[in-house]
Every structure is written in structure tokens, then in C-alpha cells.
Amino acid sequence: MGKKINKFEVGIWGAIFSITALLICIYFVTSKSGEYVQVKIDGKVTAKYSLKENGIYPIIGSGENILVIEGGEAYIKEANCPDKLCVKQGRIKRVGQSLICLPNKVVVEVVDTKSDSESGVDAIVK
């Protein structure tokens, strides 16, 4: 027979669920929709596209990816990489979200209107 769940365990699971739901709500309320997607190939920024303008953009890195922007969201429609994980990552629109294709060395990231060079930051030192 299975082990009975006591009130303490139910309380712990209830607290974990409540905290998780609260953090998800905070994320969606405080996160900001981006203005652009920035394309990096092998770590270097190669293009920047507005999320306000629909379009289809080929990205040529170590392979080829097809980036689609529609309705303020970006996603990778096609890729010639073997695993196609970048295609399965879905749509992005919030600042900091990214689509990554490791085999093709491509990163597509949602950014705000300012890039690092426009924000006044010269360097970050650890």
C-alpha cells in the first residue's frame, strides 16, 4: 500500500505551488516586450531587426536558419542543423529571451531599443 500524505506535506506542496505561481505572475507583469531582435553569429552581432515589422530573414552562420518576425514575435521557422532544437524553441518577444542554434553558432536575442554601445556602458569588469 502507498504511504499516506500528512497535512505538513500538503502544506509544503501548497506553499511551493503558490510561490511558483507568484513568481510566474511577477515575471509576466514586470518583464518588458522588446523592440528588436539582435542576431549573433559566432558571438558577433550581424543584424538587428524590428519586432514591429513582419519579415522573413535568412541567417547564414555555420549553416542556415530562417528567422520569421510576425505579430511582434520572432521564431526560427527552418534550420539545416541536425537536431532542429532551435525550431522547437517557440516564439520570443520579451527582453532577454533568446533562440539558440548551437550547431550553426546562431543566437537570436530580444533587446530593448538601446544596445550596449548606446547605453553608455564602456565595459563590464568582473
Image: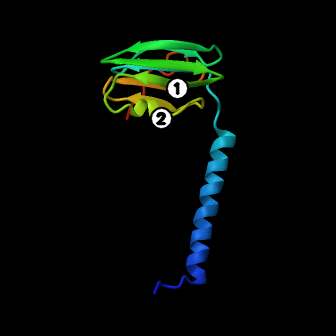
Query: Picture coordinates of residue 80 (x, y %)?
Result: 35, 22
Compared with 75, 29 (above or below) is below
Compared with 113, 6 (above or below) is below
Q: Element at badge 2? A: loop
**Which labelled disc corresponds to residue 118?**
none
Relative placement, left or right, of 85 versus 93 is: left
Q: Quick one: quadrant of the C terminus? A: top left
Relative placement, left or right, of 74 versus 46 is: right
Label 2 and label 1: CA atoms lie apart by 8 Å
The three-letter amino acid code for the residue at tag 2 is Gln
Query: Picture coordinates of residue 6 (x, y %)?
Result: 57, 84
The three-letter amino acid code for the residue at tag 1 is Tyr
Verify CB contact (< 8 Å) between mark 2 and mark 1. Answer: yes
Q: Residues within 10 Å of mark 1 (few under 14, many from 20)?
A: many
Tell me which residue sits at (66%, 42%) in the image: 28
Tell me which residue sits at (65%, 17%) in the image: 52
Q: Element at badge 1? A: strand
Tell me which residue sits at (60%, 62%) in the image: 17
Q: Which residue is mark 1?
A: 75
Residue 59 is drawn in which quadrant?
Answer: top left
Closest to the observer: 98 or 116? 98
Query: Picture coordinates of residue 103 (x, y %)?
Result: 30, 27
Q: Residues within 10 Å of mark 2 (few under 14, many from 20)?
A: some
Compared with 110, 27 (above or below) is below
State whether residue 68 appears in this view. yes
Q: Can you name the residue that lies furthest to the right here?
A: 29
**Which labelled disc corresponds to residue 89?**
2
Along the polypeptide, which appears first: circle 2 or circle 1?
1
Residue 43 is drawn in which quadrant?
Answer: top left
